[in-house]
Image (cartoon, rainbow, N blue to C red):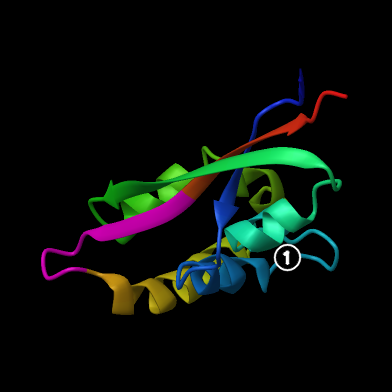
Amino acid sequence: MTQRPEVAWSALASKWDTAYDAVDAFLPPGKQWASHKRNWAIPEAEAMLPPGMEISTVAEAITTRYGSMEHWWASSLTQAPAIAWSQLPDGRRDDAKRNAFAVLEGLRASDGSLERTRTVCYTVARLHSR
């Protein structure tokens, strides 16, 4: 069998997408951080692979806990969203942050923390040997 590279991806959208969309709303057209929307159910992702492959997918829940909304914001600015969010026009970053915090307010625990659980999937596809 010939092995193809392993691929990691996220399964299904979450309620967190609205927080990222709240910031993206302040970005210039075409500059949005769209990668958070590339989520599929496992059968959908596997169906995108060429026919005749042996496919194996493992899903793992990854939980990140942020001590506060400020902690989430600071973390986001050092991770993937920062690529797009660095394009926020001058004077709009605070508006974008307030917009995101309004969304996140409903996700906060009683102690003010936020917990985000993502399903990360790892897929390996192999060509059947002839």
Which residue is depicted at the point 70% across and 52% down? 46
Which residue is depicted at the point 27% across and 60% down? 114
Q: Is residue 7 above or below residue 17?
A: above
Query: Hey, which quadrant is residue 29 in on the image?
Result: bottom right
Query: Hey, which quadrant is residue 47 in on the image?
Result: bottom right
Q: Return the residue found at the far front.
A: 130
Instruction: Look at the image and tell me in which quarter the C terminus lies.
Output: top right
Q: Nearer the viewer, residue 129 or 32?
A: 129
Question: x, y (%) of residue 82?
Answer: 61, 45
Question: x, y (%) of residue 73?
Answer: 43, 53
102 inside magenta stretch? no
Q: Which residue is mark 1?
A: 27
Query: Hey, which quadrant is residue 80 in on the image?
Result: top right
Q: Is residue 56 above or below residue 66?
A: above
116 inside magenta stretch? yes
Q: Return the residue found at the far left.
A: 111
Q: Nearer the viewer, residue 12 or 92?
A: 12
Question: x, y (%) of residue 15?
Answer: 45, 73
Can residue 90 be seen?
no
Which residue is depicted at the point 55% across and 67% down? 13
Which residue is depicted at the point 61% across and 46% down? 9
Question: x, y (%) of residue 26?
Answer: 68, 70
Can residue 20 be seen?
yes
Magenta extent: 109-119
Q: Secondary structure at mark 1?
A: loop
What amino acid is found at the position of numbered circle 1 in the picture?
Leu
Instruction: Look at the image and tell me in which quarter the N terminus lies.
Output: top right
Q: Nearer the viewer, residue 43 or 108?
A: 43
